[in-house]
Amino acid sequence: MSYDSEIFTKAEREITARRLHAESISNRHMEEIERKIPEISEINHQLADTSIELSRLILNKTGDFAKNLSRIKDNNLEGQRIIAELLISNGYPYDYMKPKYFCPICNDRGYIDGKRCGCFNDLLEKYSVEKLNSYSQINLYSFDAFDLKYYPKSDENGVSSYTQMASTLSYCREYAKTFSKSSRSIFMLGMTGLGKTHLSLAIAKEVIEKGFNVAYDSIVNYLRMIEKEHFGKADSDTLQTLLNVDLLIMDDLGSEYESSFYVSTIYNIINTRLNKGVPTIINSNLSPSELQKRYDERIVSRLIAMYDYLKFTGNDIRKIKKVNGEI
């Protein structure tokens, strides 16, 4: 996947900042220990001299090279052992002076053997998602702001929307609480104004706070960006970001313009993420029959059979609030 220069630069800066931070703390610890435990300072100087001797030995290879190399190695190990014992006996961790890198695989350099480390790729994904979300026209919500008082406790059929939506709210809270990259996908279906967007974005808020990458926007905005990039009118790679993000939330399925490109793109996103085993949340105002008419069976069957289906019922809360003078 390609990344624009702005995202790449931000990731490089964070990797560098991590390394410098770890090494700065290590240097402060080393200065502290050398003041408080002079014996360690003396051993460190001896180890530094040993490093110089080792360099000369490798360059010149004079005398019994193998024997001298083994002697230097043994001296180094013994010096490190004594330092660890002195640290512990003085109440410090044995590795107090060593840098504690964020990524112990690449030591916060971002590359291993000329290839990007996983920590660097994680940062590139993080900043790609953040940039994508900056274009979003919707805001995050909280579960606490979701008020069940607007749902009737009974309706003409004797089915309580209140009870059903209380169960849906409980499901969404638990989903956010226990979220992982292997969580189930969710399909929220119901008429406009029933809280689908609210609950999906409340999930997003909590999942983001847990440190996961979450992309959230209307499906219309996503498809327009992908279309521009596909036909060479923009340089980003929105599609790849959507395919790989930890959690993808696509709001208002069915509001997009009907076109073969859009349908194939929607199918690609749904199918690829299912194959990867990464979760997606999709909501729609369409009825089941409208869904069947608008999309082919490949899309509908995946949404109904392979997503957790949440049916939203009740009355348009926005209209209720307007009548009550709450908005």
Image (cartoon, grey):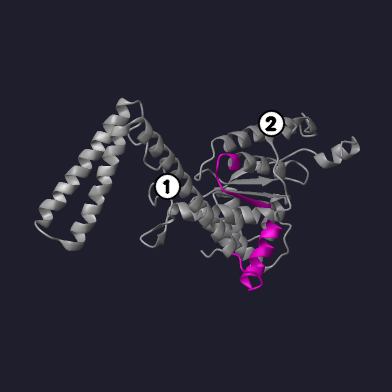
Residue 287 vs residue 308: left or right? right
Residue type, label 2: Ala
* N-term mark: 1 or 2: 1
Residue 323 belongs to the span the image colors magenta: no
Mark 1: few, some, or many residues within 10 Å (few <14, many ≥20)?
Answer: some
Residue to which mark 1 is pinned: 103
Secondary structure beneath dot 2 equals helix
Q: What's the mark number on residue 325?
A: none
Residue 69 vs residue 134: left or right? left
Residue 220 belongs to the span the image colors magenta: yes
Name above or below for residue 59 compared with residue 183: below
Indicate the quadrant where residue 84 lies: top left
Residue 162 appears in the figure: yes
Q: Residue at x 64, y 73 (%)?
A: 231
Residue to which mark 2 is pinned: 166
Range of magenta residues = 208-237
Q: Nearer the viewer, residue 287 or 1?
A: 1
How many labels sit on residues?
2
Q: Nearer the viewer, residue 138 or 45?
A: 45
Q: Position of residue 64 (x, y in %)?
A: 9, 56
Name above or below for residue 228 compared with residue 326: below
Residue 233 vs residue 7: left or right? right
Q: Residue at x 56, y 39 (%)?
A: 210
